[in-house]
Image: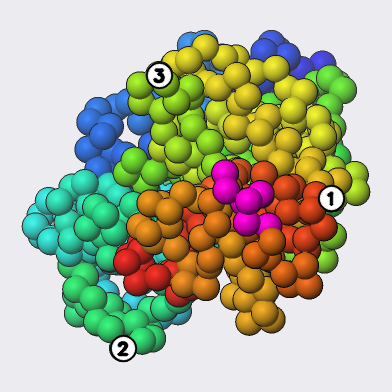
Amino acid sequence: MSRKYVIVGGVAGGMSAATRLRRLQEDAEIIVFEKGPHVSFANCGLPYYLGGEITDREALLVQTPAKLKARFNLDVRENSTVTAIDPTAKQVTVQSGDHTYSENYDALILSPGAKAIVPQLPGLKTADNVFTLRNIPDTDRIDSYLQTTGAQTAVVIGGGAIGLEAAENLRRRGLQVSLVEAGSHVFPALDEEMAAPLATSLRTHGVQVHLNDAVKEIGRQTVTLNSGQQLPADIILLAVGVKPNTDLTQSTGIKLGPTGGIAVDEHYQTSQKDIYAVGDAIEVTNQISEQPALIALASPANRQGRQVADVLSGVPTTNRGSIGTAIVRVFETVAATTGLSEAHAHKLGLHLKVAHISAKSHATYYPGAQPIWLKAIFAPDSGKIYGAAAVGTDGVDKRIDVLATAIKGGLTVFDLPELELTYAPPFGVAKDPVNMLGYVASNVARGTSQTIQWHELKAALAQGKQLLDVRDPDEYSQGHFAAAINMPLDQLREHLDELDPKQDYIVSCQTGLRSYIAERLLRGHGFHVQNLDGAIGLYQQVRSELLTTDRKEN
Ligand SMILES: Cc1cc2nc3c(=O)[nH]c(=O)nc-3n(C[C@H](O)[C@H](O)[C@H](O)COP(=O)(O)OP(=O)(O)OC[C@H]3O[C@@H](n4cnc5c(N)ncnc54)[C@H](O)[C@@H]3O)c2cc1C
């Protein structure tokens, strides 16, 4: 007997569910309710339309109800809000303009997405220049406001992915932009040293970045920060994060999880029979921490939509959770993450080690090779990869995608050198940065290399450890740690008698590779030595306090 499916939300999760259901059940009745005026629109493309990189507004409208009817025989109803669910009668109430009606279902799929968090800031309620960016009507409102008012200055509140993309695109549009982030760095999914180049890139392109500062109040075309600074703000974009849209759960008894997302089981079933949920609205299991988590990203939402259709069609499928893989571009700088950050892993109390490497996006002798930093966070005993991050201008996406695949596939850092990745000079390196990360992390895991992290350096020097800089004198003279003695690697063996066997040493170079060779050499001669992971190159991305004045700018 044919079944009737009702789907709430017609974008990533909802439309993936609807189209997969049709492919699996030709005779089913499938109705999709969408509150807004568009289904299947490209929300991820909205910032780029605002900045003018995407010029064709129609390109954002990936599908229309007419096309979905023709190809998939879907009954798509835009401008139709599901306002209530009666789980006993298996019925939803729908509001469309002035018209209210009900529709029954055999199974209901909720994919209502997330809502922008709107903090209770003094002055916010009365301001008419504050916007959030979630959908095409939001984008049109911002676009029209910019055009009609001739706004010259913008404040973006929040340095997450959407805030960063909005800041870049408002700047591209010619506005004077300030970005305010309460935390110590932008893109909080990343650790501080990996996110720092994003802020540098914003500043290089004329965006003022205010870190460790929060908005105190919104005034008439100004924003006042806790620090007292006042920023000009013809337009304000609020991008402080999202929360699951759980409006429909309140009166239905659908249970929420500890994170506030809709709780679902391994088949995406909510606590109410025949009601399923997917996408940004649900709580998932973080596959690495095995803790409940909110992971509001397009790839999981699309996958979950397809999987719930499989479940409802009897195709064996399990909701295995997500790891959280994300990427952001700020002008020429790209940063990406998969799995846990170091900060998150520490918060969970995981026993972990970290390795950073600096490499080139492809063979150095082939034109255009760009530097890239990679980081792995892992368990030293098992080699389990807790997370990875990358930042650079080219090849970041490729490396993080490989690492995300490795994590999902259960590979360890010991397996990374085994990966056989594409190589020809324009594309990569025979020892790909991911292989190199595996070599370095394996060395750290096995104790072949004993490292110290950039944020531990200050305390270590205060304890009396001596820093040796093994770069060449000309590199050293261009900028170095104030406390470092220069002892070039190629002359180190000749100068061993100048070192004190009772002293603890830290070796540093530009990126950590030469200093690793020095570390092995010194340890081979019985010295106590640690390698500064990422060396001065990584340190100066984040801090300047221990450096000599000639290299303080960052
Ligand atoms: C500006 C922006 C940029 C983004 N960029 C990226 C990116 O680059 N990469 C990435 O991975 N993710 C990105 N995301 C996140 C990504 O778009 C979401 O994770 C994904 O769309 C979630 O899918 P979903 O189906 O859960 O919700 P959505 O795609 O948000 O769809 C939910 C829909 O449900 C509708 N709805 C809600 N309540 C009701 C109701 N009661 N009745 C009827 N309809 C209802 C809403 O109107 C909405 O259209 C971005 C999001 C935004 C807003």
Nearer the observer: mark 2 or 1; the answer is 1
Callout 1 touching callout 3 (CB < 8 Å):
no
Q: From this viewpoint, which residue is outermost toward the bottom?
A: 228
Which residue is located at x 26 percent, y 34 percent? 53
Which residue lies under the disc numbered 1?
A: 447
Please tell me whether residue 44 is drawn above or below residue 540 in the rendered image: above
In the image, is 344 to the left or to the right of 158? right
The amino acid pointed to by label 1 is Gly
Which residue is located at x 78 percent, y 61 percent? 527
Q: Nearer the viewer, residue 71 or 285?
A: 285
The quadrant of the picture occupied by the N terminus is top right
Q: Secondary structure at mark 3?
A: loop
Rendered image quadrant of residue 442: top right
Q: Secondary structure at mark 1?
A: loop
Can residue 375 be seen here? The reply is no
Span highlighted in magenta in the image = 490-496
The amino acid pointed to by label 2 is Gly
Q: Secondary structure at mark 2?
A: loop
